[in-house]
Image (tube, rainbow, N blue to C red):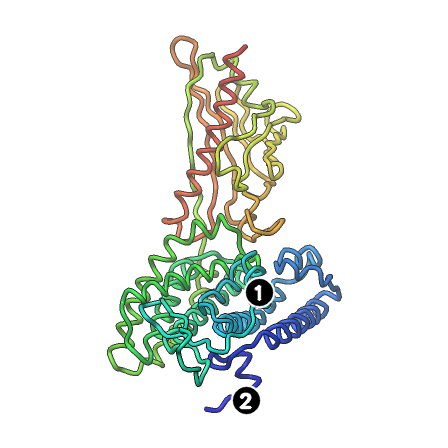
Amino acid sequence: MNIPRELGLLVGLRARVPRRAYIGWGLGLAVAKFAVDTAIVYGFSHRTWSPLGYVIPSLILRNQAVPDAPEAMHVLLVALALPFLWIGLSMSVRRAADAGVSPWLGVGFLVPILNYVTILYLCLQPTRTAARWEPTAPGVYRQPGRDDPPPSTAELPSGVRSALLGVLASIALGLAMMGLSIYGLGVYGTVLFFVTPFAMGATTAAVYNAQVTRRTGETLGLAVVATILTGSAALLFAIEGVLCLAMALPIAMVISIVGALVGRAIVTSGRNQATGAAAMVVALPLLAAGESRLAVPDVHDVTTTLEIAAPPAKVWPHVIGFSDLPEPPEWEYKLGIAYPMRAKIDGEGVGAVRRCEFSTGAFVEPITVWDPPRRLAFDVTQQPPSMTEWSPYREIHAPHVEGYMTSRGGEFRLVALPGNRTRLEGTTHYTLAVYPELYWRPFADLLLHGIHTRVLQHIRHLSEEE
């Protein structure tokens, strides 16, 4: 099929991309992207944002400009970003080849912060008229020698084209499911974290091996690269932060490898599996929609215990309220996980309101059980975000930080021990609307144990120094 020249220059993988075309089309597409996004935002909210926001292409900047916009707007913005993402990646890869460097350098277009360096470098490099890239080993390409004849074509090797198409398909599928699941359905579920990586790996392998059966190791490595680049693209658009992606990446890579093995086996079996592949892709949003309706989070309890060399009567005043804690030295808190700072109480007895202030805000805790000096229990009617997601950008507010890990209440129990000692137990009742719980609950329990330990150790220090 013959593709019009200009269209082939933008979306294809064969046409050479000279420096002038790369700069000209890059600027033109940036203006077009801004115009399209501005029109969408204005249509939903009758507001606009500054072009300076595109210096850092993150959704948080749009969220600040249009805080009350419906989630459908963000889903549409992500969906319309995918064609521009492919054009930028495709042209960057071919610009690298045209400049006489490895075409894989163009993949840096997908990496936050590095993308600016990549674009600038490619804009500065002149065309190498004798550029020709021939594989000497898997993933290794040689530069032509001085005596080599001039090339008759600037096409990328077929293996590189197949690899890029496989990576593109995987990234498009992953980002589309992120947009649908997170912003459309409001669910961080098994379909997103388990089924989608499997489909991404299978898709990458199927496209990469469609024309030529390639080595298993290369196929699996490409599936892992596609998974990592999907996370990088999520960072680029500020859909998620580093911490959440880092926790999800290990299981996503393992499952994508399994999917790649299955996808490669199906393609190399010689049977036409186009119908089955299409059915799998169509099934993903249907499965996600079903999961969003059926998933009901269970209430879990996390209890941490510590002994104090003081009687319960001396410990009790520091349980109902305590002074400022020292800044946490632990590395995980430096990445943005919320940590307790102080606690105050307004009133006394059942109905009093305790405020436990964290680095991200305050928990509002009406007292439900007041039994000094043995037991203090409370509900949670208001709570701050569970973390401030770490990101290459100044700030990001990922949806999962509010409403997905929810504290329902808690209690302190003080048990008198021989020798004027006290066993202090801190318990949190919480729900976790991130699935599968089998994978994510250990992270949540570990987080709560860390918070409990900080508070209980501070109470012990205050009680024992009196």
Query: Which residue is rendered at x = 28% and y = 64% of the image?
Result: 217
Residue 137 point in image, percent of width and height: 31, 68
The amino acid pointed to by label 1 is: Ile
For label 2, the residue is 4
Q: Nearer the viewer, mark 2 or mark 1?
A: 1
- Among the 4 quarters of the image, the one containing residue 64: bottom right
- Among the 4 quarters of the image, the one containing residue 466: top right
Query: Which residue is rendered at x = 42% and y = 15% of the image?
Result: 416
Label 2 crowd (10 A; few <14 / some 14-19 / many >=20): few
Please indicate, yes or no, whether residue 286 appears anywhere in the rendered image. no
Residue 6 point in image, percent of width and height: 57, 84
Residue 215 point in image, percent of width and height: 27, 69
Report helix, strand or loop for mark 2. Answer: loop
Q: Which mark is drawn over residue 119?
A: 1
Which residue is situated farthest in the front direction here? 147
Which residue is situated farthest in the bottom direction here? 2
- Tag 2 and tag 1, C-beta contact below 8 Å: no
Quick one: quadrant of the N terminus?
bottom left
Report whether 202 appears left or right of 241.
left
Report helix, strand or loop for mark 1. Answer: helix
The amino acid pointed to by label 2 is: Pro
